[in-house]
Structures are given as structure tokens and as C-alpha cells.
Amino acid sequence: MSSDNGLPPTPPDNMLGGNANPGILEPDKEARTMAMLAHLLGIVSGFLGPLIIWLIKKDQYPYVDDQAKEALNFQITIMIAAAGLIVLSFVTCGFGAILFVALPVVEVVFGIIAAMKSNNGEYYRYPLTIRLLK
């Protein structure tokens, strides 16, 4: 079966192994597990967990390199936001501290979403993240 332009038809996305881009290889089970671990460790250890995963596995798995850097960038952004909220709390005589309740909730929710996506082999990007490591 050929298309009108003389080229063979492209397979639908679900036949490409879950990746819409056939040039990108789907990560194997260990790479997905390490990427998921980088996101989950970020929730409990801040930037240290993703940093350790990134330093150990960045040369072995390109997928882990990408996802651990993304988790590390997110944790650094959370630290910057916390520092900003401390300043805001002083400026507003403590009223800015109300926003401290939202920060851990955002960290946990987005961390879990990222862990689930990376365990499925998807490249996840956190919203509103400063990407210091590229």
C-alpha cells in the first residue's frame, strides 16, 4: 500500500513502540527505573538524590541523563522558590508564610507525576522550572 507521493505510508504512532519519533530509542527497564528513582528521591532528599543518580548514570543511559537533570533542575527551582518565600515572609510580617504550605504540595504532586511518566519511558518536563543544567 503506497501513498499518493510515492512513499510508503508511515505507521501510526501506536506501532512505533510508544514513541512518536522513530529516531529516539525507547529506554530499557533499568533506565526507566533509574529515572523514576531520580524523580522520587527528589521528593525526599531535595537535590541530592537526583544529583547522585545523574552523576552515577549520566554516561550509561542518555534517558537517565535527561530525566535526572530535569529532576535536579526542578529541585533547585524549589530551593530558589523557598528562599524567595522566606524573604516574602519577612517583608509581609509573616503573611507570606502561608505560601509555604503550597510549595511541598507542588513538589510532591509534580514529583509523582514525573516518576510515573518516566517509568513509562516518556520524557517529562516540569512546568515553571529554571533549567540551569542543559
Image (tube, grey):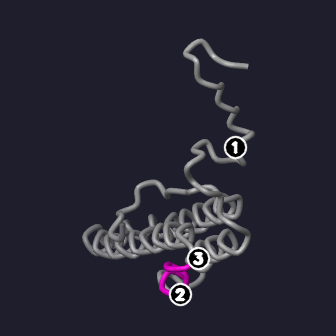
Residue at the (55%, 15%) spot, across then down: 5
Q: Nearer the viewer, residue 30 or 89?
A: 30
Q: Which numbered disc, 2 or 3, marks the residue closer to the eye?
A: 2
Is residue 57 covered in magenta? yes
Q: Nearer the viewer, residue 120 or 99?
A: 120
Identify the residue position indicated by label 1 in the image: 16
Is residue 12 covered in magenta? no
Residue at the (59%, 23%) spot, across then down: 7
Range of magenta residues: 53-60
Q: Secondary structure at mark 3?
A: helix
Tell whether 62 sits left or right of 73.
right
Q: Secondary structure at mark 1?
A: loop
Q: Which numbered disc, 1 or 2, marks the residue closer to the eye?
A: 1
First of labels 1, 3 by sequence position: 1
Identify the residue position indicated by label 2 in the image: 56
Q: Quadrant of the N terminus?
A: top right
